[in-house]
Image (tube, rainbow, N blue to C red):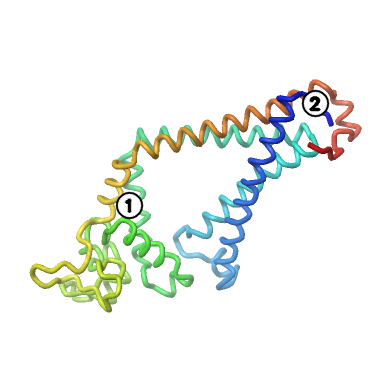
Amino acid sequence: MRVTSCAGKCSKVILLLVNIIIFLVGGGLLGLGIYYHLDEGLYDTVFKWKEVVTVPVIMMFIGSLFLTISFFAIVGALCEVVIMLKIYMSIVAIVLVFEVILMGVCVAMRGDVEKRAVLVIHNLMDHYGDKNADELNIITKTIDETQVWLTCCGLAGPSDWGNEVYAKYWAALYNPDNTTTFILPGSCCTDRAADTCPYTTTEGQTVHYTAGCTGQFNQFVENNVTYITVGGIVLILLQVFILISALKVRFELSSKYDCDDYAGGNNMEITSL
């Protein structure tokens, strides 16, 4: 074993444990993402997708990123390969810097970020209920779960579902004459067991959510801004801690073996913890 100090051994164990967990999580996300796509054919759903980035695509990207990062850490620490630890630290440092920049941009350009998010949701709403554009029913399920979670209906309000500008397919199907008697998605109803969810309600009776999802989400963020901020800080500190652990292992290995040892392949021996 090349890492012999107590601090080095502890850093190595922490590095391995944390990245094994990340590796398993990444594998799970990647597997789920691939499963949802393969459900209707890999080629059609991945390479011929229409206009929108789907949840499985995001899951596969994050899963692949987790697997790649953790692979370098696990192999680098277990086999004590300095070059792999260097690659791992570089990736983690890049991700860390990107997260800090992203947080700064989101705070500084909050208005623009919100407008962009609303535009993306508009595009998703256009395909709600359309089996041709949403073959896996992912868009529909995502919007339904969001409306139930936030107890909201539409972006600005329930009337969005009757407007082809915001919900092209749904409005054309259920409100072609642009009236106020159209049907809302079932996820807008306060009664989950209701057969239909009409936009026009009986006087004094509310059968659907009246708040828009944009306002509800902004309210959710404002109510939980402390938890979100603390969570972001904890995530960054955790990455810094992992980076320090990797640096400790890397420097201890470098101090004991020079480049000639590595070139001769001596550092590829798998050692115990």
Residue tagged 2: 4
Front residue of this view, candidates 139 and 18 = 18
Front residue of this view, candidates 58 and 74 = 74
Furthest-bottom residue in view?
195
Residue at image coords 30%, 40%: 111
Q: At numbered mark 1, what does the secondary structure look like: helix, strand or loop?
A: helix
**Percent of width and height locating residue 243:** 62, 30
The answer for how far apart the CA atoms under marks 2 and 1 are is: 54 Å
- Mark 2 crowdedness (10 Å alpha carbons): few <14, some 14-19, many ≥20: few
Q: At numbered mark 2, what does the secondary structure look like: helix, strand or loop?
A: loop
Q: Amino acid at mark 2?
A: Thr
Q: Quadrant of the C terminus?
A: top right
Front residue of this view, candidates 83 and 16 = 16
Q: Amino acid at mark 1?
A: Val
Specify which label sits upstream in the sequence, 2 or 1.
Answer: 2
- In the rendered image, which quarter is residue 147 located in? bottom left
Residue at image coords 27%, 59%: 152
Q: Quadrant of the N terminus?
A: top right
**Percent of width and height locating residue 182:** 21, 74
Front residue of this view, candidates 126 and 144 = 144
Q: Are marks 2 and 1 in contact (CB under 8 Å)?
A: no
Judge depth for marks 2 and 1 and give the one in front: 2
Q: Say if 6 sits above or below 62 in the image.
A: above
Q: State how many labels appear.
A: 2
Q: Would you say 233 lies left or right of 7 here?
A: left
Residue at image coords 57%, 30%: 240
- In the rendered image, which quarter is residue 2 located in? top right
**Percent of width and height locating residue 90:** 64, 33
Residue tagged 1: 118
